[in-house]
Image: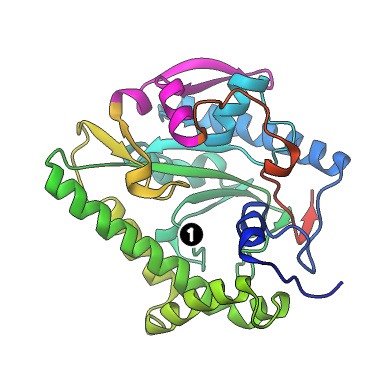
């Protein structure tokens, strides 16, 4: 199979589907997807036990919430589980993680280094492999669950806007610095002169300006910026590491930091109190409708081991 060449219209779909069809990647078979989902349920069960033991508040996040209310569990084609929690609860998770879960799992987050290169947190299962397109230079490539930290925001609208712009800036710098690090590998998968290569190379050029800073240092600066507001009672919270970033994922604290009970694949879980508002923001007014197959978000893998 040759390198992938895409037009601008296809490029958006290519990113959305996790580089599906890219040389060296494959789509999971139904059997692999089923086994992966079973592994993730086992992981979620372990995490919920820890959250309960250490009084850590959480809710499911994003597509996991949508799957809960629309399907009673996984969106049938989904291959991950996402969690939201406040910065204060995440700090509690960090303090107790190794004691509670360190024998089975690794905590991967921007401030902990190891070339994580993302602004959200992942918990990865030891002795497994789930290598994706953005796992090129990482030592930790196990089957994972994502944690998105909800950050405090300033009640003052001017400070809130300044904080948001700073978060967007550091988040963008990180998304450029990591491709610069990975560019020798990425080039193998891109046709010279294609729209996709152009999009990556624009990021690489920006990333080169910050080559004097390691990926880990840029990630730490991004998280320091995200968590800059210390008001744990602010009216709004934001998820700067989410798919719609700081301003697109601005929510009332009461909608996101309070929860209600639900059931996910037979497990008792927490989802946001303001689920309907949350789903409208992320997925639009028709979020309960099953999307056509071509619009479904499919993640491909480069290597998988249970």
Q: Nearer the viewer, residue 92 or 297?
A: 297
Q: Is residue 201 left or right of residue 289?
A: left
Residue 274 magenta-highlighted: yes
Label 1: state its secondary structure: loop
Residue drawn at x 47%, y 26% is: 53
Q: Locate residue 292, reporting x and y percent.
A: 72, 35
Q: Quadrant of residue 85?
A: top left
Q: Locate residue 142, reporting x and y percent.
A: 67, 54
Above or below, 25 against 211 in this view is: above
Residue drawn at x 45%, y 36% is: 84
Q: Which residues are magenta?
A: 254-282
Q: Locate residue 232, reporting x and y percent.
A: 22, 35
Q: Quadrant of residue 1?
A: bottom right
Residue 129 magenta-highlighted: no
Q: Is residue 46 left or right of residue 205?
A: right
Q: Locate residue 112, reporting x and y percent.
A: 43, 60
Above or below, 164 against 25 in this view is: above
Residue drawn at x 38%, y 40% is: 249
Residue, disc 1: 118
Within 10 angstroms of label 1, few (less than 14), some, or many (20 or more) residues?
many
Q: Quadrant of residue 20?
A: bottom right
């Amino acid at each position: 199979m040759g390198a992938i060449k895409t037009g601008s219209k296809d490029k958006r779909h290519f990113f959305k589907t996790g580089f599906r069809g890219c040389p060296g990647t494959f789509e999971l078979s139904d059997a692999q997807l089923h086994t992966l989902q079973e592994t993730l349920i086992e992981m979620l069960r372990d995490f919920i036990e820890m959250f309960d033991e250490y009084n850590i508040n959480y809710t499911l996040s994003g597509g996991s919430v949508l799957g809960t209310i629309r399907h009673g569990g996984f969106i049938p084609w989904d291959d991950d589980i996402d969690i939201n929690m406040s910065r204060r609860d995440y700090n509690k998770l960090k303090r107790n993680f190794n004691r509670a879960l360190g024998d089975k799992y690794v905590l991967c987050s921007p401030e902990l280094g190891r070339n994580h290169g993302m602004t959200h947190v992942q918990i990865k299962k030891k002795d497994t492999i789930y290598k994706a397109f953005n796992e090129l230079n990482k030592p930790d490539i196990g089957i994972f669950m994502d944690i998105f930290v909800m950050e405090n925001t300033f009640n003052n609208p001017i400070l809130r806007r300044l904080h948001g712009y700073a978060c967007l800036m550091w988040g963008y710098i990180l998304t450029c610095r990591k491709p610069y690090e990975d560019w020798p590998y990425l080039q193998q998968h891109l046709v010279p002169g294609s729209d996709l290569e152009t999009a990556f190379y624009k990021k690489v050029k920006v990333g080169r300006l910050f080559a004097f800073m390691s990926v880990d240092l840029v990630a730490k600066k991004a998280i320091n910026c995200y968590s800059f507001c210390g008001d744990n009672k602010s009216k709004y919270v934001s998820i700067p590491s989410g798919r719609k970033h700081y301003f697109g994922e601005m929510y009332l604290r009461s909608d996101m930091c309070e929860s209600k009970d639900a059931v996910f694949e037979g497990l008792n879980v927490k989802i946001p109190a303001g689920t309907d508002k949350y789903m409208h923001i992320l997925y639009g007014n028709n979020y309960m409708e099953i999307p056509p197959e071509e619009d479904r978000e499919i993640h491909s893998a480069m290597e998988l081991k249970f």
